Image (cartoon, rainbow, N blue to C red):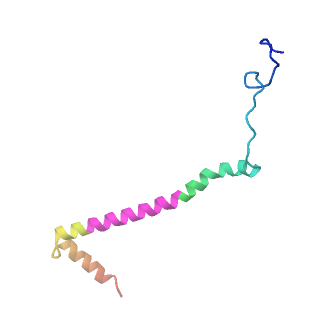
Amino acid sequence: MSAAGSPRRPGKLDGAWRPAPRCGSRADGLLRPLLRPLVIAGLVPLAAGLYLVMTTSFTAAKRNILRRRIGPGSAASSDAAVLRAGSGP
């Protein structure tokens, strides 16, 4: 009996409290360390694709704006035309 006069029961106050057993399987403990690299491996190609789309669209927009400002008769546009014409067989 405890000091209060009631029968002694193991519990949180007694120091006998233990956490509930885990409900996962043994494989759960083995797969958990692999979760972070798998998430990263899935996000890296997404980031690379987003990078390529953004840089390509930015470059295309920049060229379009510069082509409009410079005009078709300038040296820069004629150099590009010579390069395009000279690249073929």
Image x and y of residue 69, in percent: 17, 67
Q: Give residue 86's quadrant in the image.
A: bottom left
Q: Does residue 28 sit above or below 69 in this rendering?
A: above
Count of marks overlaid on the render: 0
In the image, is residue 18 above or below residue 47?
above
Residue drawn at (75%, 39%) of the image? 21
* Outermost residue toward the top in this view: 3
**Residue 44: image location, x then y, percent:** 52, 58
Query: Is 55 left or right of 49, judged from the image as shown?
Result: left
34 falls in the magenta region? no
Quadrant for the N terminus, please. Answer: top right
Determine which quarter of the picture holds residue 75: bottom left
Q: Quadrant of the C terminus?
A: bottom left
Q: Please give left or right for residue 69 compared with residue 58 in the image.
A: left
* Name of the residue lying farthest toward the front: 6
Determine the main secondary structure of the stretch shown in magenta: helix
Task: Looking at the picture, tell me which residue is in the foreground, 31 or 58.
Answer: 31
Q: Position of residue 72 (x, y in %)?
A: 17, 76
Q: Residue at x 73, y 45 (%)?
A: 23
As for residue 61 lying within the magenta part, the answer is: yes
> In x, y percent, where is residue 25?
75, 49
Using the image as rendered, state which of residue 67 and residue 14 is in the foreground: 14
Q: Which residues are magenta?
A: 43-63
| Relative vertical location of residue 28 with respect to residue 79 in this rendering, above or below | above
Residue 61, quarter of the rendered image: bottom left
Indicate whether 6 appears above or below 72: above
